[in-house]
Amino acid sequence: MVLSLWQNWQGCHDMNRLLAILRRIQTRLMLANKKRYLTFGTDLHVGKGTRLWSPQKLTIGSHVYIGKHVNIEANCEIGDYCILANRVAIVGRHDHDFSAVGFPMRYAPWVGSKRRPSPYLDEQAVIGADVWLGYGAVVLTGVTIGRGSVVAAGSVVTSNLPPYCIAAGVPARVIGQRFSDPETIGAHELAITKGRFRFSERGYDHCLIEPAARSNKSTA
């Protein structure tokens, strides 16, 4: 009985390790052949079915989790410790110039064209550190999402969002705050800066997660 339980546990343990290896390989394959425009930090995860492309530059920080079937098809800067949930999209606001006279929509001037250079070639989306983009959220270029923000599932971000806000809707509007006061924000950022974190493809419970302890100042 004990031997059987041990063998079952060992089998699950080995399978978990194998899946972790396969996930690491998957991420590396997703990042291959993108050196022309892509730079990224450590501990990056990219889910299956995701597309990463940029006409100029795509920068992804460290400890970033990109879910399944995410589409990034624009210039973009993503800060450290971000989560992009499944089916998030970051797209160009001016990908196709629908105002060009004489061009049917199918052949409207495209932002990545060398034949007809676009004035919006350098336009980008900026996503600050420690941001969560919920399932199916869409972010357009030309906007900055402040650090620490949360964007609700299905939202469409068309304008700038301040740090540590909670935003939702189409278009996205601020509906709340993640933290209520500057002191809490300061403590949160200090705990991250001085903490230790490391991602594991084996799952959340295998990650190194050690926020720095908050110091208690004695009062006289």
Image: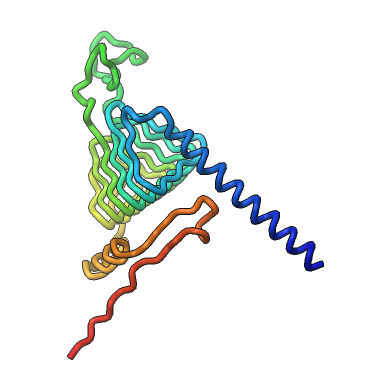
Left or right, 201 with respect to 129, comes to right
Residue 81 at x, y percent in the picture: 35, 52
Above or below 195: residue 35 = above
- The x, y position of residue 21, in whole percent, is 56, 45
Residue 179 vertical placement versus 171 (above, below): below
Q: Quadrant of the N terminus?
A: bottom right
Q: Residue at x 20, y 88 (%)?
A: 219
Which residue is rendered at x = 25% and y = 49% of the image?
161
Residue furthest right in the image: 1
2 in relation to 30, above or below: below
The image shows residue 179 at horizontal and vertical percentages of 29, 65
Q: Quadrant of residue 38?
A: top left
Q: Nearer the viewer, residue 110 or 101?
A: 110
Q: Nearer the viewer, residue 183 or 6?
A: 6
Tell me what residue is drawn at x 22 percent, y 29 percent: 122
Residue at 59 percent across and 46 percent down: it is 19
Dividing the image into 4 quarters, which one contains the C terminus?
Answer: bottom left
Q: Count of labels shown?
A: 0
Which x, y percent locates residue 132?
A: 37, 51
Q: Quadrant of residue 55?
A: top left
According to the image, what is the colour scheme of the structure?
rainbow
Farthest residue to the top: give it.
102
Front one among 213 and 178: 213
